[in-house]
Image: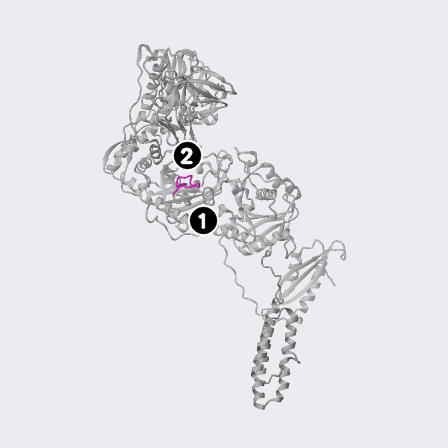
Amino acid sequence: MQYNTLESIDALRAAAAAEFQAIVGDADAENFRVKYLGKKGVLREIMKTLGNVSPEERKTLGAAANALREEIESRFNDAREQSKGDGGGDPGFDPALPGFPFPSGSLHPLAQIRNHIVEILASMGFSIAYGPEVESDYNNFEALNMPPLHPARDMQDTFYINEKAVLRTHTSPVQIRVMKEQKPPIRAIMPGRVYRNEEVSARSYCMFYQVEGLFVDKNVSFADLKGTLLAFSRRFFDENTKIKIRPSFFPFTEPSVEVDVECFLCKGKGCGICKHSGWLEILGAGMVHPSVLKSGGIDPEIYSGFAFGMGVERIALLKYGIDDIRLFYENDVRFLKQF
Amino acid sequence: MKILYSWLKDFIDINAPAAEVASALTSAGIEVASITEISIPDGVKVARVVSRDPHPGADKLSLCQVDDGSGGEPLQIVCGAPNVTAGMTVALAVVGTQIAPDFKIGKAKIRGVESFGMLCSEKELGLSDSHEGIMPLPHDYKIGTPLSEYMPYDAVIEIEITPNRGDCLSVLGVAREVSARFGLPLKDITKKPRENADDSVTSAISVDVENAGRCPRYMGRLVRGVTVGASPEWMQRRLKLAGLRPINNIVDITNYVLIQYGQPMHAFDYNAIEDRKIAIKTASSMGAGQFTTLDGVERKLAGDDLLICDGKRPVALAGVMGGAGSEITEATKDVFLECAFFEQGGVRKTSKRLALSTDSSYRFERGVDPAQGLENALETAAALLQELAGGSVAAGVIDTRPNPFADKVLALHPSRASRLLGLEFTADGIIPSLNSLGINTLRESDDVLRCTVPLFRHDITEEADLIEEVGRQYGYDNIPAADSARVELVRQPSTAEINRDMARHALCYFGLNEIITNSMVSEPRRKLVTPDAEPVKIMNPLNPDMAEMRTSMAVSLLETAAYNLNRKNRDNRLFEIGKVFRPDPKSELADERDILAVLIEGACFPQSWGNQELPNDFFVLKGILEAFAANCALGTPVFSRMESSVPLYGPECASITIKNAQTDIRGTIGRVSDKICKAFGIKTAVYYAELDLTAWLSAPKPLPVYTPLPKFPALERDYCFVMPETLSSAAVTKEIESVSPLIAKVRPFDVYRGEKLEAGTKSVAFSVEFRSPDKTLSDEDVADACTKIIAAMEKEHGAVLRK
């Protein structure tokens, strides 16, 4: 082939581009390089044949041939640079193979629910207080308006450590500790582990978590309690959640109420989770009993307050749709890794 | 407690259906557990069995001819119940009766014999769970009458009464609440006996109360000449539906009154009362050490148990249970009825100590009505004995103290109710709602109401209790929620929450699974892990596996690892931040510590297509702790050999000390001993570590100390020394570091033991990094230090540079 016209150089460009695209693997690439860019390659050969044309044509054709050579060289080198890091591209590369077996950790579902509750209440202005799990009988019962022979003690089967100490049956004794340490206004939540001497079953365990709340100030009213619990329920469940309040009894609050929250799953229509009532029993609450304020060294003539409490397990069971409370304490990692 | 709708109707003319009554009770604070409606289906009628013959084709079936009162031929009915006899009056469901939503009686052929209906059991009619044969009906029921005429619609409402509302443990008490809710008047249904003027209770028996504090009021009546027998069907029916077993007319009457008024009563066989004397005194005063209750159990008495005694011996455990020997028998002729108010605490103490809770003790513990209620119960019981057992009631009543308690008068300030409930309440609004509960009000001023509280309301003792009644009557759902619960935006963030979460998240990111375990453990397991620790013991454990509070987290983590391994969950990596307990010598409480425990087992990285398995070992766990400590700014942990052996670990273990600005954190780490693994049923190598985070949790995170980055590159030199086996790498590192201020870092990177070395020696390779803040170091700059390192190692530690 004689390359003595611009057309013939363009034809060479097209041929080179086609061959370049067809390159598969190192051997092809080498053949291509030798053919076009090698010392005896086509483009070198062109220069030698230019002697037969006029000086003007030689100039034009020479420039065109040089440009083509640079073009091919640069494309070839770019492609070679690129393919170098990837070892030329492995057709057997399989991204579906497992990644390096780093273990995946998990946080316990109960701790997650507990923290969710605590975070919401903390953002509402409640600070966090703790108390011991081995608690005095006085703080656990007497200071909370449950003297030794009070039948309300039957509501909570108790583990005794000695005559004067028990495994706390609720987080309410922390109320007494907080009131003794702080002056009103008091806004505190008290998360913690509590114990009940009850047979273990799918529905109850001898140990569980509560989160207790306490608010003491001048003129704190039942309407404040309702407002707080409504705000909490809406943050925790759904912004349109409704609550319903029934009278109840706790020795340490007067009045005492049970707060039912509209079922988050069926939105009050009735489903398996809420036993077709549309409501979930979630919270116990009430206005702090004057005797309890007095036990905490606070004058009930000046101050009033509300308290509320909820069980973390119960909420976790409902929220996750788990039917056996023991799963939380058996810690089967196949269970834990789901949360 | 089970309350009969029809019984409520004795007290109130209410037409609202049972479900509506139940929801009113719920909003009054009386939780309704269930409602069971009793409704005899149309088509069930009274019938009589004319004859009963064996079924020709089945041993267990019988062939009955039944007269359904229609005047026609008897109906042939196949029946499976063994108790059917000729002449029996029964409930017959005729063909076409819809006995249940999914069960309609049809003409049937049973084993080849045609059957035209069904004889019903109590269960089939929804009257009880009793499936024991066909229900016999009284013979005075007229054949052919629809059974619903004798057994009209009714409902059993099962309620749960909170311990403060002892006054609601009766039909009357529930009726009071219903009356207040619906604004309907409460009827007085007390019955009065006709007294026999020729007989006098006071001359027939004397009653002496030794301690009026324990027995503020004791009433009694004498009924002579009773005939002990079955109580009438209507009474048995009510008792059964209320959950009590009918016994005989005398006992049934006292039980009936118990359910109706909530007043426990006891019927004594008058002729068994020695010396015709009743004395109420303590066991110590009586000199009684034990007592046999009427269930035949001999019970050991405590000195302050209250007893009802006759002239010679105790006859009842006051308020709890009567005694064997004075109870009603078939032969009883004369009955002494006891109706008393026993002090709550005393009854509870005895009942708790003896673990003997009865319908009677349950109500006395919660307080009965010491006034009108006591009188109404006694009068009604005496009248019923007269009516149903043919007794003659002696004139007069024993009554030790007609007015044992003063009127309970409390002041209520409407302004205070408004403040506490968060809604404006006026005297005019409050008065009618309190009156409907039987609380009388006297308006002293617009803001002071003098309230006289009925003595049966033991739960109302102060103003707050009255405010609760106001709120309850108004309805809590009707009190609007405050728009803005008063919230304070300034708050102290909780250091403990922040630190705990930081630690938990760090460990989670290192691939560990958080667990939450029971803090109660068994004594043998505690002894295995911490044999010398004094535990906090539980006096009344649920079972021996939970007899003590844990002294180490190791028991909990090992149990969890074993649980998972038993379920073929491999390569476990677990952690928990939990509490351990020791007795606190300074108080009756415990010393509680927050401990981080970590357990790893199996592989750190299991084998995969691109890597070999990397098994977990001591140094993997150490690495986790080091990374964790750095991540959470705990400080740098120092691991040292234990001074003495620790039962939990085998020989491969160390103590951990982390010093930081606020506090020292201490802990241990090691491979759990084979013996302990075996005891927990674990066959793999388990590595465990714990750190006491108690002080750290409440310490704020320190501000990181910034060091400018080096300006000049470092120079590295590697050394390999042959040294005694016992020489610790920490000692070598320290030695080399002290040689020159140019030495920035010393890091052991290889350890070799083997045949090429003398016994008792090892070869350790160290990488030493030299760095100057002023210039790039040359070989000459460090030549001197290099010589010194080799010399110092040889001189101080007998370590020789390996060629």
- Residue appearing at x 67%, y 58% in the figure: B732
Q: Residues within 10 Å of mark 2 (few under 14, many from 20)?
A: many
Q: Is A271 included in the stretch rendered in magenta?
A: yes
Specify the farthest residue to the bottom.
A55
Where disc 1 sits, the SS reads helix
Dot label at residue A332: none
Q: Is B571 included in the stretch rendered in magenta?
A: no
Residue A90, compared with residue B473, is above or below; it is: below
What span is colored magenta in the figure? A269-280
Q: Position of residue A67 (x, y in %)?
A: 57, 81
Residue B214, compared with residue A204, is above or below; it is: above
The kind of residue tagged 1 is His
Q: Nearer the viewer, residue A54 or B691?
A: A54
Dot label at residue A116: 1
The reply to whether label 1 and label 2 mark residues of one chain is yes
Q: Position of residue A239 (x, y in %)?
A: 38, 49
Quickly name the residue at label 2.
Answer: A146
- Chain letter behind tag 2: A
- Chain letter behind tag 1: A
Where disc 2 sits, the SS reads loop
Which of discs 1 and 2 lies nearer the camera? The answer is 1
> Distance between the Cα atoms at labels 1 and 2?
31 Å
